[in-house]
Image (cartoon, rainbow, N blue to C red):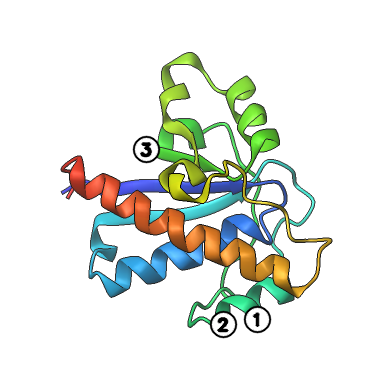
Amino acid sequence: MKKIRVLFVCMGNICRSPSAEGVFQTLLKERQLQHCFEIDSAGTHAYHVDEAPDLRAQKAARDRGVELSHLRARKFIYGDFEDYDFILAMDDDNYQILMEACPEEYKTKIKYFLDYAPHLGEREVPDPYYGGKYGFERVLDMVEAASLGFVDSLQQEGHF
């Protein structure tokens, strides 16, 4: 069985996208679906390449049973368009950057992550980097909701 390849994308790959990666990986383990997926995260900018996620993101995630400390930031590369089945953007800026760089044949792979949590009434996961502690909590709430919606959507579509 071919694994479903999912890439979460934000700007620097130290807050939102690694949080989404960690939350999604934890959900897959809980549902015993990790064998069906290959998961990663990346940033559209190279500000933090090889750095661990923001310590505030790590702490907020750890408080919910999600470990992020092993993750390292990387920059999105052109080959990711071909390599991943789903490229999930965290906000408008990163969605636009991806769409502008993407070859036409891969554009359907790029989606807003929060489109899988329509009940939230928002399309963008806000960047918590310059906010306080509660910004990271809000991001986790949002990525948990979107992760559940994404897995449910894939199941309904018969991916596994």
**In this rendering, is residue 99 above or below 50?**
above
Q: Residue 131 vs residue 40: left or right? A: right
Q: What residue lies at 67% left-to-right and 61% top-to-bottom?
A: 15
Residue 159 in sight: no
Position of residue 50 measured from the top left corner of the image (x, y, whole percent): 69, 61
Mark 2 belongs to which amino acid?
Arg
Q: Disc 1 and disc 2: Cα gap in Å?
A: 5 Å
- The picture quadrant where one finds residue 68 is bottom right
Q: Which residue is mark 3?
A: 85
Name the one closer to the observer, 143 or 85: 143
Position of residue 111 measured from the top left corner of the image (x, y, whole percent): 48, 35
Q: Which residue is mark 1?
A: 59
Q: Secondary structure at mark 3?
A: loop
Answer whether labels 1 and 2 touch (C-beta < 8 Å): yes
- The picture quadrant where one finds residue 49 is bottom right
Position of residue 119 measured from the top left corner of the image (x, y, whole percent): 45, 49
On residue 141, the disc is none
Residue 81 in sight: yes
Q: What residue lies at 80% left-to-right and 70% top-to-bottom?
A: 132
Q: Which residue is mark 2?
A: 62
Q: Secondary structure at mark 2?
A: helix
Q: Earlier in the sequence, mark 1 or mark 3?
A: 1
- Farthest residue to the right: give it: 130
Q: What residue lies at 60% left-to-right and 49% top-to-bottom?
A: 42
